[in-house]
Amino acid sequence: MIAVVIVVLRYLPVTSNLFCFSLLENYAYDVAFGLRSPAVPSDVVIIAIDDESLRPERLGRFPWPRRYYADLLELLSEAKVVGFDVLFTEPDRNDPQGDARFARAVQNHGRVVLGAYRRIRSEQGADSSPKMPGYRPPAGGIGMLQGIQPLNFTLPIAALAKATAGIGYVDIDPDPDGVYRRVTPLRVGYDGVIYPHFATEIARVASGTAPQEIVADLPAGQVALAGHRTFVDSAGTSLINYCGPTGTIPRYGFWDVLQGNVAPEKFAGKIVLIGATAPGLYDIRNAPYRANNRFFLGVETNANIVNSLLAMPPLKDNSRAATWLAVALLLGIISGWIVWSYGEVAGPLIGGLLLAFIALPSFLVAFWVVNQVIPYGAIVLAVAVSVGLGVYERLGAERRMIRDQFSVYVSANVLEILARHPEIIREGRRREITVLFADVRDSTALSENTEPEVWLAQLNEYMNEMTEAIFEYDGYLDKFMGDGIMAIWNAFGTESHHSELAVRAALAMLERLEVLNEYWRGVDNRIPFRIGIGLHTGSAVLGDAGSQQRRQYTAIGDVVNTAARVETMNKELGTTFIISQTTADETEALFKLREIGEVPVRGRTQPIGVYEVLGEESGS
């Protein structure tokens, strides 16, 4: 019964994207890409608008005069196609003659594709607006293509639009978790014309495929380029078959190419995409690679889409296919029956084996072997829930022990809670921990002089970086207190060298803040932060504390109060990062410490020794 409910929920459109399904399926999808070896394309390269090219003594600040692009095109005369992942929707402000020169270079090359973008605008006077070129729809229909208002396309300036070999829209939408896994390769306008994505148009020009051939199989849910077919799902999107993480596609600097440091022969017969890679231009598109925080560049995304359309095995989204949902249902029913029908040990064991060796690896097998994305959430949950419920009942020795031991001491309701959550009995442990407090200096004044939405945005950027530093060194993020942070090491008794980890995390926080401040100095409405950090090591009680309405696992004791007081000493001492004597005793061999001396602590009768942390010792 449980398996039936899960499969039905996964099949129905209104519930198919429930968080429990999307979480599992997106995670499996990302893992499949992360474990797969990169496949460097042989005919796709990127020319990067990078930091080196943006240096004042090179080409200077962006946007650049159009003559630079014209000069670059002359060096790329042997390229199969050149796609500019740069928008040219306004005239050249730097050189009145630049647009004409660039347009001549585009026309002379003959295989240049430019980008357009969509914006919602009034249709008043739209009849005089230039139209983006498109494809005629096939006689058999357009399948499930998404609709679009063609009058909303913002095209390159007229001279460039006339000279180019193709124009495509650059718009691409992420999945709900912010990761770009899909592209809409074609859209149908309300005028009946089919309009291509920027990458689709690059692939068309590169392959010499006629538009009629590209759209011929739309009724069957396919897009064809040079005989290579890509599947289009019921939402009109295609899965991007990435060739590898960021940096997989060969990349050359714009300045290096322009200066002749890269031989033009490198680009002969290649598909060349030109786009931004410099951090300051922020063309970032998160990809399904969890390493490096999913970092991926927009020009890399478009290059991967081109490569998917022309070379990579096509991925098919079968996540709502009846065949795979039937597999999920069958596995769930079988696993549940085994757990309930076999012995108390054998049943759960066999059910666990089904989960571990069939359900869990099923996505990877389908993805790598037959290039299909399956309803992994339904498969895993149908088996896991069936097995889990059976195991819960069959292997409930601990629950029975609690019922026997506490049945005469608590009410039936409390007894049921204890039976369902036996971990509660084990809470309330005392152990030695290291506590960190961090606080933004002068935050009240900063917030009062900053627009609320700007302040919150900057504070969120700061909190994200600080959280990553804490997690990097296995810290437990206890709470945020306005702009303050409390974190604990050894909260669960798993870190024997918790003082060292806490100090390293604090140093990492300061390093990240330095990088963040450097970035903020170049951004409007951002003010560099100064923070104070304090650490103290001592004994505390850890457990689930709170009310009936809200509870939290936390630490209670003098160590917490003292750590907070140590952090506030930074204001009086003019320091940034100080630790108590107890923390210093555990870490003095690993870090450079400057002894400050004993300092009175509000709420304590005895002063405590404090030390300023200056960095790591050499070789530590």
Image (cartoon, rainbow, N blue to C red):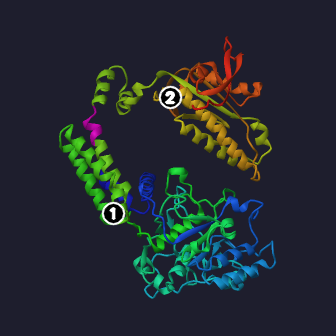
Q: Is 222 drawn above or below residue 559 in the view shown?
A: below
The location of residue 56, given as percent across then percent down, is 77, 60
Q: Residues within 10 Å of mark 1 (few under 14, many from 20)?
A: few
Residue at label 1?
Answer: 369
| Distance of label 2 from label 1 (alpha carbons) | 43 Å
Q: From the image, tell me which residue sits under label 2.
A: 491
| Residue found at the far bottom of this picture | 139
Tell me where residue 386 appears, x and y as whole percent: 29, 47
- Callout 2, which amino acid? Ala
Q: Which residue is drawn at 55% across and 81% down?
A: 205
Q: Quadrant of residue 232?
A: bottom left
As helix, strand or loop, the secondary structure at mark 2 comes to loop
Q: Which of labels 2 and 1 is toward the front?
A: 1
Q: Residues within 10 Å of mark 2 (few under 14, many from 20)?
A: many
Q: Which of 393 and 446 is in front in this view?
A: 446
Task: Specify whether residue 198 is in view.
Answer: no
Residue 236 as seen in the image, left or right of residue 284: left
Question: Where's residue 533, x and y in %?
Answer: 67, 31
Magenta range is: 390-396
Q: Which residue is drawn at 73% across and 72% down?
A: 68
Q: Main secondary structure of the magenta part?
A: helix
Q: Residue 322 in the image: state x and y as whole percent.
A: 32, 65
